[in-house]
Image (cartoon, coloured by chain):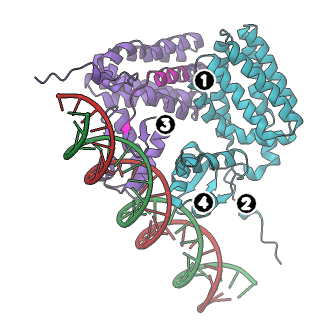
Chain colours: A purple, B cyan, C red, D green
Amino acid sequence: MARDTKISAAEHCYRTLSRKIIGLELKPNEPIGEHALADLLGVSRTPVREALSRLSAEGLVDLRSRAGVVVAPIRMDAVRTAQFVREQLELAIVAEAAQQSNRRILLGIRQAIEEQELAIVEDNPDLFFECDERMHALYCSLAGREGVWSFISDAKKHMDRVRRLSVQAGQLDQLVQDHQGVLEAVMARDTEKAREIMQLHLRRVMLDLSELGRLFAPYFEQNEAKAEGQSPAGQS
Amino acid sequence: MARDTKISAAEHCYRTLSRKIIGLELKPNEPIGEHALADLLGVSRTPVREALSRLSAEGLVDLRSRAGVVVAPIRMDAVRTAQFVREQLELAIVAEAAQQSNRRILLGIRQAIEEQELAIVEDNPDLFFECDERMHALYCSLAGREGVWSFISDAKKHMDRVRRLSVQAGQLDQLVQDHQGVLEAVMARDTEKAREIMQLHLRRVMLDLSELGRLFAPYFEQNEAKAEGQSPAGQS
DNA sequence: CTTTGCATTCTTGTATGCAAGATTTTTGAG
DNA sequence: CTCAAAAATCTTGCATACAAGAATGCAAAG
């Protein structure tokens, strides 16, 4: 209520919806109407529409022309592509980062890791992911390539929902251990080891992908199989 | 005039403006008004606004709140970042492509290169760049990672205007030779050589960047140097 | 009971109106 | 002539109105 005047309503809509979608607060395949969102966000349809247009370009919502808007289902293809992109970029970044040494940034990374441990204890997924983002972004800074983070971030959006799902079954401790390993390697200027651990780390998310696809089937894109024909109306 | 009904007006606006900006038909730092664009495109301000919103998110236009819209100046930082991102992705792609062999795609690549040579003879920059895009996209297909192209394409947008500028001074022949070299290496399954030539090729664009910054200074972002304080009013 | 065609309702896509902030011009004083 | 302040103009940001297409429900026929 304090900074309402600073950013536009459209931007506010974009950020709020983006956060809600990635945080699974709005569920994949869930129908959302422009009017309903406008009411929810307390604005008119126009800024909502602008936000939806951007989200559609990013692949987070599907605009079905004149037939409604739905939160985009998680698409296996998109996840794999995003993983590839992210891996290439982050590995290159961490390799460059390992050749730099900025005390302040390194300290920030350490702090982020510690805070992330705390987030696990507190069972606070939002904080966990926030720290994760901060840490990875700091590696970009360390490498002197802050701009690259926005590209990684774009790719990550397609994976974040999967990560959220895997949290519910997940071993978060292992991820933090990975982070510590990467940091040690970077501080030791061991480029190869840093890349190695980071690669392992980044691929960990994908391990249970097919299982998640089964567990959370309604969140994933259905392969054109008309499910209704299989389940008879078990009413009688 | 045949497919007007298929895509929305907003999408039409987005594509048209995107093309005009990248093609330097709309010049960097040129002020554009929503109303003027609406008239130009024969629609109302609403779809124009939607397009501008997306273009702003991509960094192709700057929306100065209530003070006008300008075509984004070329930003050196953004170009360097885009170059980094593109290089990482394309090198990984060509390395994977070199381990595949799909006759039809390889043929398509060869065709694109030949058509590109033709474009040089005809002095047709639009065709030249269109072939270039097609070829690079085909390598993504060859690697079985079509989805990656959209990410490369996003990064490329920040470099394309620079490439357009360097065409005017440029040796396009060299670029085509690079392409042929890459194709040969890929067909010979020589991963390392393919990466090597591709890297050289991708970096060629950046060589004259600083010179272009001087030659086309008004197209580039000015470094906050208040020019007015230095030039006294030489009226009297 | 199932199916087909129609009418209703709902949702989006676009146009337009209005208000607020920024820019420019004008006007007046020194 | 210079500078400053205020008014007029311009431009965007948001809300609303309207129209066209899609989905849904209903009724009638087989």
Distance from disc 4 to disc 1, alpha carbons, whole Å, reads 53 Å
Q: Mark 3 Cα within 10 Å, few/some/many (few <14, many 20+)? A: some
Q: Quadrant of residue B153?
A: top right
Please, what secondary structure does the residue beneath circle 1 have?
loop
Q: Which residue is mark 3?
A: A58
Asked if the stretch drawn in magenta spans residue A77, the answer is: yes
Q: Does residue A123 appear left or right of residue B135 in this picture?
A: left
- Please say if the residues under marks 2 and 1 sit with CB atoms less than 8 Å apart: no
Does residue A157 appear in the picture of this structure?
yes
**Residue A71's spot in the image, x, y percent?**
37, 36
Distance from disc 2 to disc 4, alpha carbons, whole Å, reads 38 Å
Of marks 2 and 4, the one in the foreground: 4
Magenta segment: A70-85
Picture disc at residue B42: 4
Q: Are marks 4 and 3 on the same chain?
A: no
Distance from disc 3 to disc 1, alpha carbons, whole Å, reads 33 Å
Q: Is residue A230 above or below residue A60?
A: above
**Residue B96's spot in the image, x, y percent?**
63, 13
Q: Are marks 2 and 1 on the same chain?
A: no
Distance from disc 2 to disc 1, alpha carbons, whole Å, reads 36 Å
Q: Which residue is mark 1?
A: A100
Q: Mark 1 Cα within 10 Å, few/some/many (few <14, many 20+)? A: some
Asked if the stretch drawn in magenta spans residue B23, the answer is: no
Kind of residue indicated by mark 3:
Glu
Q: Does residue A180 appear left or right of residue B101 in this picture?
A: left
Q: Which residue is mark 2?
A: B227
Q: Nearer the viewer, residue A66 or B196?
A: A66
Q: Nearer the viewer, residue B89 or A230?
A: A230
